[in-house]
Image: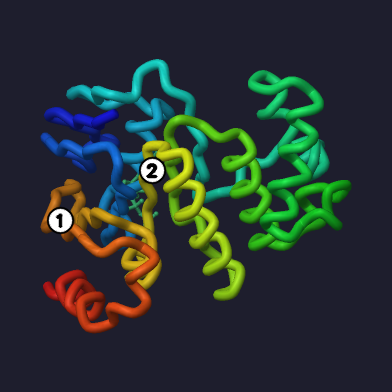
Amino acid sequence: MELLIKDLHKNYGSLEVIAGLNIALPSGRIHCVFGPSGCGKTTLMNILTGLIQPDKGEIQGFSNKTFSYIFQEDRLLPWCTVEENLLFVLENRYERSEAVKRVDKYLSLVDLERFRKSYPEELSGGMRQRVTIARAFAYGGDIFAMDEPFKGLHLELKKTLMDYIIHYWYDKKPFFIFITHDIDEALYLADDIYVFQGPPLNLEKQITIDIPHIRRECRKEQMNHYKALLMKK
Ligand SMILES: Nc1ncnc2c1ncn2[C@@H]1O[C@H](COP(=O)(O)OP(=O)(O)OP(=O)(O)O)[C@@H](O)[C@H]1O
């Protein structure tokens, strides 16, 4: 599945956030949207996932697909426990027994089994973020769209989750696109990094990392080259 963004426009009042954006994102790659705060990354992601409508332009390749979306804010239902929050999205997609199995598996992945009966307000921001990660993977959409998915997580868990994502992606090959400000996250996870400036959002450069994920840690010199490219103004 290729994603085509054609002549996309979005204004908020007089602020032009996206003004004629065109990009093609091929399948079979992990895509990273990288850029400074306020340049329009979330607006783009919200349009790609159908949460908001563009003023003009077209998105091709995402129709009739299911989404696993991690928002910047957790969007958990405050009146539901952690496990109920997961079951709520799983119920329409899986039989009850499969849904329960998935809740167990993914709460364990994010190390939150002990908190399954807790309510969102009883959790820290990082824990709520972990619930949304568990919910996204438990749902298992065709498209994973993640807006700063590791914000507020400590390094060890972040690395476990990034390794899990890589493993999941090689296994199931969903369309995978994520936003980050973090250079190391981008270099660890992405195959294609789209560096934006804005608003209006414009593609400054694209960096393609042609080293398989499992080799990146031992190819330090080449990875430093990509890092330098990413940091270069
Ligand atoms: N609903 C809205 N109404 C008005 N202005 C908005 C709205 N949403 C975003 N903006 C503005 O549009 C611009 C782009 O916002 P957006 O959230 O897309 O940026 P971003 O690159 O995702 O930023 P960050 O990395 O800080 O999340 C910002 O100037 C923001 O203030």
Expressed as whole percent of the image width and height from the top left, the position of residue 61 reads 28, 24
For the point 33% across and 49% down, which residue is it?
Answer: 30
For the point 68% across and 55% down, which residue is it?
Answer: 109
- Sequence-first tag of 2 and 1: 2
Q: In this picture, is 187 found above or below 97?
A: below
Q: Residue 226's image quarter?
A: bottom left
Colour convention: rainbow
Expressed as whole percent of the image width and height from the top left, the position of residue 32 reads 31, 53
174 or 143: which is nearer to us? 174
Specify the amino acid type for callout 1: Gln
Expressed as whole percent of the image width and height from the top left, the position of residue 72 reads 50, 50
Label 1 Cα crowd, 10 Å radius (few <14 / some 14-19 / many 20+): some
Disc 1 is placed on an element classified as strand
Task: Indicate if the residue with disc 2 has its beta carbon within 8 Å of ligand 1.
Answer: no
Q: In this picture, is 2 found above or below 165?
A: above
Specify the amino acid type for callout 2: Phe
Q: Residue 229's image quarter?
A: bottom left
Disc 2 is placed on an element classified as strand
Labelled disc at residue 176: 2
Expressed as whole percent of the image width and height from the top left, the position of residue 127 reads 69, 59
203 or 38: which is nearer to us? 203
For the point 25% across and 75% down, which residue is it?
Answer: 223
Labelled disc at residue 206: 1
Label 2 Cα crowd, 10 Å radius (few <14 / some 14-19 / many 20+): many
Q: Residue furthest top?
A: 64
For the point 73% across and 60% down, which residue is it?
Answer: 111
User: What separation in Å lies between label 2 and label 1 (alpha carbons)?
Assistant: 16 Å
Viewed as shown, does residue 176 lie left or right of 167?
A: left
Q: Quadrant of the N terminus?
A: top left
Q: Quadrant of the C terminus?
A: bottom left
Q: In this picture, is 228 found above or below 80?
A: below
